[in-house]
Image (cartoon, helix red, strand yellow):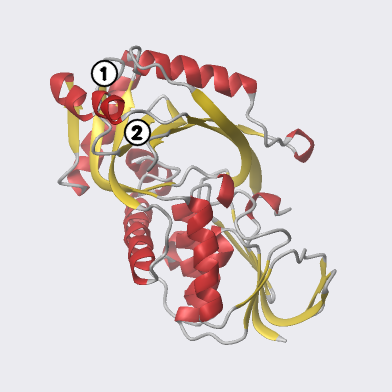
Amino acid sequence: MCDYLVVGGGVTGVSLAYFLAKNSAKKVVLIEKETIASGATGKAAGTLVVKAELDMKEMLEKLGRKKGLLFWKANHEVLSSLKEIIEREKIDCDYELQDTVYGSTSRDQDSFILGEYAVEKKIEKSTQLIAGEKLREIINTTFFRHAILSKNHGLSVDPLRFTQNLSAVIEKYGVKVFEHTPFLRVKGDKAITPRGTITFKKLIMAIDSETRHGRVRKRNSTLIVTKPLTNKEVALIGMNPKKIVWDAKNDYHYFKIMPDNRMLIGYGDRYVTKKHAQTSPREIAVNRTKKFMKKLFPKLNLEFDYGWSGNYGVTKNRIPLLDIKGNIWFIAGAGSQVGCVMAAKHIVNKLLGKDSPLEDFFKE
């Protein structure tokens, strides 16, 4: 028997169990149908950023100023919280605090970038609008026309190692973790698994894209990793110091330099059904990625080494889903891992009867 049964061993479930344990919750059990971080978490890019799924201007327009600023502040706090957890728990995951660069590649995107900068600058005093020679000092390309440089707005990690190592930490705090334990169904206050029945007081479903909740849609994104660049090449393209770079025209078109000097590049997202889900890199995404990177760095001879596609869940309004049905709680659809951790922290406060600064944000 347990007080809290967490279903799902991704970043949401593991961080939720961590916050429960750190708040002295007892009898916490986490089950995962495969291995920890084997789903969307382990296939993610590990680019944890403040902007998350919504830009600042978009947040204020969609959510209203009060709610939008609350979301922005919460993203900042989660990024700081993750950094503190990694350092305090000595989690080996190649983490590095980095600046982010958000660039426009066409006249159509210039007005968007300028508008986004105007809004962000009012809140983030260190944010800069860069162009021309200044831009090429930060990221050495003539393809970007303007860019927003946000200081320390990104955290680069290996998401697989982060989550797996955090799972080892929660076990030290008393959480019982069971891998290869699929959740089959609920019968009253009992969760049925192939390995036995678990009686619970609260059940938290943290399975993201695998949830059957109607408000969560599944998306598929492709990641590609190049062969290692030389130190000279990294410096030549302006990625020393390292930073996380986006194309404003395609929010899911981004890249970063990994610790071994490989470039990790993300491209695209599309809604998929279960039968269309795939893990091998989509050819159209690979070809578009190659074209984009050639435009960005025409003199750089990138050699693509390997890649993969993965699914993740997202809600229509990009706000993480929190749904409570009796003693069963659903959490999914955050899109970004920062959003996942944010929602997990909020749920733990509610489970433990504590005030949450995000209460107004999650209200419909």
For discs 1 and 2, the disc positioned in front in the rendered view: 2
104 above or below 182?
Answer: above
Percent x, y for residue 111? 29, 23
**Labels 1 and 2: the sequence-earlier one:** 1
| Viewer-proximal residue among 197 and 234 | 234
> Is 195 placed left or right of 301 in the picture?
right
User: In this rendering, does residue 348 appear at all?
Assistant: no
> Is 147 placed left or right of 8 in the picture?
left
Identify the disc placed on residue 245: 2
Q: Which residue is mark 1?
A: 145
Quadrant for residue 360, please give it: bottom left
Q: CA distance from mark 1 to mark 2?
A: 14 Å
| Viewer-proximal residue among 141 and 215 | 141
Disc 1 packing (10 Å; few <14; some 14–19; many ≥20): some
Q: Amino acid at mark 1?
A: Arg
Tell me whether circle 1 and circle 2 mark residues in contact (CB < 8 Å): no
Percent x, y for residue 100? 30, 39
| Viewer-proximal residue among 89 and 296 | 89
Disc 2 packing (10 Å; few <14; some 14–19; many ≥20): many
- Number of numbered discs present? 2
Identify the disc placed on residue 28: none
- Determine the residue positioned at 26% across, 26% down: 232
User: In this rendering, does residue 144 appear at all?
Assistant: yes
Percent x, y for residue 308? 61, 35
Quadrant for residue 242, please give it: top left
| Viewer-proximal residue among 189 and 309 | 309
Q: What secondary structure is marked by label 1?
A: loop
> Is 210 placed left or right of 100 in the picture?
right
138 above or below 4?
Answer: above
